[in-house]
Amino acid sequence: MAILPILHFPDPRLRNPAQPVARVDGALRALLDDMLETMYAAPGIGLAAPQVNVSKRVIVIDISEERNAPHYFVNPEITASRGAEVFEEGCLSVPNIYENVERAEWVRVKALGRDGKAYELEADGLLAVCIQHEIDHLEGKLFVDYLSELKRSRIRKKMEKLRRHTL
Ligand code: NI
């Protein structure tokens, strides 16, 4: 297992739509394990492959307090959603920024698991928010895209300044 470097907004690589996974094999499982380790170390509750510069439709999530209940989503797709809820979100690719975003309050998602088998999951609350946030990453979309242009440009400036100081 390895901890992978995480790309930060406004890195243009975060904007590329990710490619579907053809086969869940050993290499893909190694990626899932590395992503999980990277997410736990960060620490975060969700991570999408484009955030670690891998253009694949792969997500890991763990919202448990104990950090021992990982969810693996390969080629995830939201097949139903309803309601609306506002949550304060953050993102490992936009460190130290937290803003309110409105999303569906309930979703049904289908995906392949770590074993390559198809499954379906229904989620609400934090898990539903997290699934929608991470699937956005697969489309090259970030939570700051839901904010006003003014707010987003302020965050961009802050990130660029931060990067200059941490090089
Ligand atoms: Ni994120």
Image (cartoon, rainbow, N blue to C red):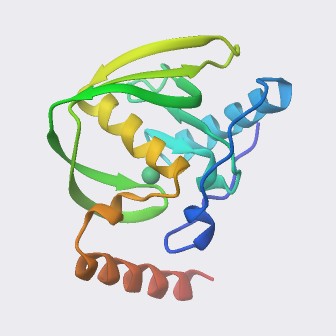
Nearer-the-camera pick, 15 or 29: 15
Quadrant location of residue 122?
Answer: top left
What percent of the width, then of the height, locates residue 7? 60, 64
Q: Residue furthest right?
A: 26
What percent of the width, then of the height, locates residue 59? 56, 36
In the image, what residue occupies the spot 65% across and 54% down?
Answer: 52
Quadrant location of residue 45?
Answer: top left
Is the N terminus in the top left, top right, bottom left or bottom right quadrant?
A: top right
What percent of the width, then of the height, locates residue 97? 32, 65
Is 99 drawn above or below residue 151 in the view shown? above
Nearer-the-camera pick, 161 or 147: 147
Is 127 drawn above or below residue 13 in the view shown? above
Quadrant location of residue 13?
Answer: bottom right
Q: Residue furthest front?
A: 79
In the image, what residue occupies the spot 45% across and 88% down?
Answer: 161
**Residue 65 visible within the image:** no
In the displayed structure, does residue 26 sit left or right of residue 160? right
Is the C terminus in the top left, top right, bottom left or bottom right quadrant?
A: bottom right
In the displayed structure, does residue 29 sit left or right of residue 142? right
In the displayed structure, does residue 27 sit left or right of residue 157? right
**Residue 136 visible within the image:** yes
In the displayed structure, does residue 126 sit left or right of residue 72? left
In the image, what residue occupies the spot 64% across and 40% down?
Answer: 35
In the image, what residue occupies the spot 31% across and 76% down?
Answer: 152
What percent of the width, then of the height, locates residue 79? 40, 24
So how many labels did they put on this image? 0
